[in-house]
Image: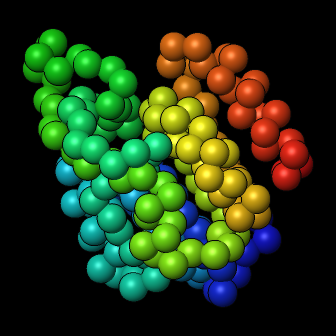
Amino acid sequence: VDIDSNSIVLDAGAYTGEWAQEIMDQYSPTIHAFEPDPRNYKQLQKKAQANSRIIPYNFGLGDRSESVRMTLEHLGSSIFSDTSGKNGVPWAEVEIRDIADTWKALALDRVEFMKINIEGAEFPLLDKMIKMDLLKKVDCFMIQFHEWHPGSYAKHRRIREELSKTHR
């Protein structure tokens, strides 16, 4: 990835901050790290305390601002799978914020790199970015598409088609 200490990176689904720390160690950009799972966010905060260029946010990015129920399964925490109450899987009410509103609130113009790993919520997030013409404002994406999400293959193809208009 062509980033350096002057770059802006968005980490949607920051988990506990390991990926952000690796990127920080290698490139030293400013990283806006978004993590709605309260348990993972506590670990992310600890990493951010050691490096002021990692800026943690205790909310997720999405297509609209809302409070939603999230099952808390560490790596697989999701607002799209409700396994809470089954085998003792905990849940929490978490905040999701509209990507366009967040973009504006952070006064972002160009983002050099955006990592998205948000357990099925990548589809509505990217749909909103398409609608608001934000794809072209991100130089490089790294996206984990979750195939278990209903209609994922068709959504994935459509999003890739949109990305192909502005990205390789």
**The quadrant where residue 28 appears:** bottom right
Task: Locate residue 164, reporting x and y percent.
Answer: 86, 42
Residue at 40% in and 58% down: 34
Residue at 48% in and 29% down: 120
**The quadrant where residue 7 appears:** bottom right
Residue at 26% in and 19% down: 82
Nearer the observer, 56 or 17: 56
Q: As displayed, is residue 63 above or below residue 76?
A: below
Task: Locate residue 163, reporting x and y percent.
Answer: 79, 43
10 with respect to 67 (left or right) = right
Task: Locate residue 88, reporting x and y percent.
Answer: 11, 20
Q: Is residue 37 visible?
A: no
120 with respect to 147 (left or right) = left
Nearer the observer, 150 or 88: 150
Q: As displayed, is residue 57 above or below residue 95?
A: below
Task: Locate residue 24, reporting x and y percent.
Answer: 55, 74
Q: As displayed, is residue 6 above or below residue 121?
A: below
Coloring basis for residues: rainbow
**The quadrant where residue 22 appears:** bottom right
Q: Is residue 52 visible?
A: yes
Residue at 28% in and 68% down: 45
Number of labelled discs?
Answer: 0
132 with respect to 103 (left or right) = right
Q: Quadrant of the N terminus?
A: bottom right
